[in-house]
Image: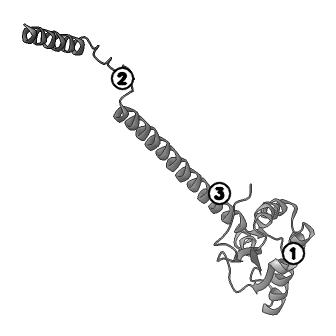
């Protein structure tokens, strides 16, 4: 009977042990945060790329428009520099109606301080070659003085006379003679880096 008590006690102990093991609470699962809603990255990147492309196209169009406007302004400035100044018969004074032509050249020369120009004096075919060469030089010098009086350095303006050697118009009449009594302008240096006046 002693064996059976021991067996019963052992059995009881085993059952209690097993029950105690089963009674242990299961570990509590760690809570997981719900996923955060994120806008699809592909769509945002696509929108950003499209916007960047649009901005780049607009910048390129503006640069092209600015370059075209600048080229047009430079072409206009070169045309203004090339405008001829006309003189009366046997005179080297600048006529009042020709002063505006010279005045229009001033902003261009001021905007391009390294530019040098040549003023060539011309005459009609009346008078001797020697007289006409002298008169052509006086006409070129009159333009140079006019420019110098308005702040253009003498060293930037070269003068030359062609007298009657290079007529602008052929003929023995007032119209042809009037076109030949002139001062012409040529850019000697600084034309390739020319800036249009503001």
Q: CA distance from mark 1 to mark 2?
A: 78 Å
Which of 8 and 192 lies nearest the eye of the viewer?
Answer: 8
| Residue with the mark numbered 3 | 73
Q: Residue at x 18, y 12 (%)?
A: 13
In the image, 169 versus 7, the foreground residue is 7
Q: Residue 35, which numbered label? A: 2
- Which residue is pictured at 36% across the width and 23% down the height? 35
Q: Earlier in the sequence, mark 3 or mark 2?
A: 2
Gap in angstroms between the C-alphas marked 3 and 2: 62 Å
Of 134 and 127, nearer the camera is 134
Left or right: 114 with respect to 36? Answer: right
The x, y position of residue 66, in whole percent, is 59, 52
* Colouring convention used in this rendered image of the protein: one colour
Q: Which residue is mark 1?
A: 153
Callout 1–callout 3 Cβ contact below 8 Å: no
Dot 3: what SS?
helix
Instruction: Determine which quarter of the picture holds residue 2.
Output: top left
- Earlier in the chain: of badge 1 and badge 3, it is 3
C-alpha distance separating marks 1 and 3:
24 Å
Sequence order check, earlier mark of 1 and 2: 2
- Badge 1 marks a residue whose secondary structure is loop
- Kindly indicate the quadrant of the structure image that contains residue 100: bottom right
Is residue 103 at least partly visible in the picture? yes
Instruction: Say which of 43 and 140 sits in front.
Output: 43
């Amino acid at each position: 009977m002693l064996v059976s008590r021991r067996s019963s006690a052992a059995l009881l102990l085993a059952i209690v042990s097993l029950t105690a093991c089963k009674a242990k609470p299961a570990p509590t699962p760690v809570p997981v945060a719900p996923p955060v809603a994120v806008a699809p990255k592909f769509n945002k990147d696509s929108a950003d790329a499209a916007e960047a492309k649009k901005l780049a196209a607009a910048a390129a169009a503006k640069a092209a428009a600015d370059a075209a406007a600048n080229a047009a302004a430079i072409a206009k400035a070169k045309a203004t520099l090339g405008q001829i100044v006309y003189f009366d018969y046997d005179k080297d004074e600048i006529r009042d109606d020709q002063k505006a032509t010279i005045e229009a050249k001033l902003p261009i020369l001021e905007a391009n301080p390294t530019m040098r120009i040549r003023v060539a004096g011309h005459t009609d075919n009346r008078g001797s070659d020697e007289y006409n060469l002298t008169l052509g030089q006086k006409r070129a010098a009159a333009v140079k003085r006019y420019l110098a009086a308005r702040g253009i350095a003498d060293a930037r303006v070269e003068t030359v006379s062609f007298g009657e050697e290079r007529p602008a118009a052929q003929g023995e009449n007032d119209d042809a003679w009037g076109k030949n009594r002139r001062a012409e302008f040529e850019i000697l240096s600084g034309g390739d880096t020319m800036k249009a006046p503001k």
